[in-house]
Image (tube, rainbow, N blue to C red):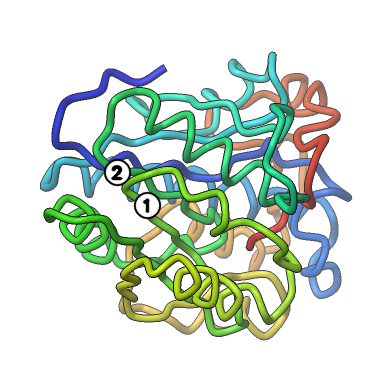
Amino acid sequence: MGCAVPGTCAIGVMAKAPQPGRSKTRLCPPLAPEEAAALSAAFLHDTTRNVAEAAATAPIAPYAAYAPAGAEDLVRAGIAPGTALVLADGSPPMPEGVDGFGRCLLQAIDGMLAEGHEAACVLSSDCPTLPTALLVEAARLLLEPGDRAVLGACADGGYYLLGLKARHPEMFSCIAWSTASVAEATRARARGLGLDLVELPPWYDVDDAASLACLRAERNGYAAPATRAVLARLDRGEAGRGDAAAAPGMTERRRQAAIRPWRRGTGRTP
């Protein structure tokens, strides 16, 4: 669990252990399953490190929102040091209409707010080059007086970040997860609540061949060293060999042990 400090914004990266054949499957092809798992592990490591770097300059508490219960050691092996854990397996009872991946997102928000943070964000791990400044800005907006939500939309219609200051289950209700309507449906939920919604600049998530090409070409965001290292190994045809599909610090044995990281929901980016 985290060590909450008053006036802090928690940012929880939606985390799951990478597994060939289960991770980043929309990247197969052009990648082999082992290569996609290696890239997924690098995304998680870089995203949690990005949050940790943001926390060095802003009142941010870094978390990894993980599943299933019992996978704590597996998750810790692949994330930045100092990142706290919050369970997000979607298992607690939820309000009617909160289904699929929304259960995991709401559980993560609830868990971080329960730690005493003034605000909480859920963050996709599929945006490894997201500029650190956007994380700092999300925290700044959420820590200003008054209730509001902060949304960072993706080009594909989903979102990379959603931040709240209070529990609003309606923000996760009756949404067709992993579709191009997620961000717009979330905006509609905020309007229905009369909740002020502030939007960050859009970014992109990496979940298909076209966005992978964008990642290879893009140099303006976070440096994402683990991701760049895997891409370099891919170029040399090495990334799927041996234990390269494991997260930094995660052994092959540990990775294989994580057989059902998301029992509820899709495990996909919103």
Report the residue marked by disc 2: 119
Q: Is residue 217 above or below residue 133?
A: below
Q: Which mark is residue 243?
A: none
Distance from label 2 to label 1 (Cα)?
6 Å
Question: As shown in the figure, which amino acid type bears the numbered disc 2?
Answer: Ala
Report the residue marked by disc 1: 164
Label 2 with label 1: CB-CB less than 8 Å = yes
The one of 24 and 106 positioned closer to us in this rendering? 106
Horizontal placement of 11 versus 156: left or right?
left
Q: Residue 174, how many percent across, how many down?
A: 72, 63
Instruction: Quadrant for residue 33, please give it.
Output: bottom right
Q: Residue at x 69, y 27 (%)?
A: 92
Q: Residue 179, how many percent across, how many down?
A: 74, 75
Quadrant into which the N terminus falls: top left
Horizontal placement of 181 versus 143: left or right?
right
Question: As shown in the figure, which amino acid type bears the numbered disc 1?
Answer: Leu
Q: Residue at x 30, y 67 (%)?
A: 131
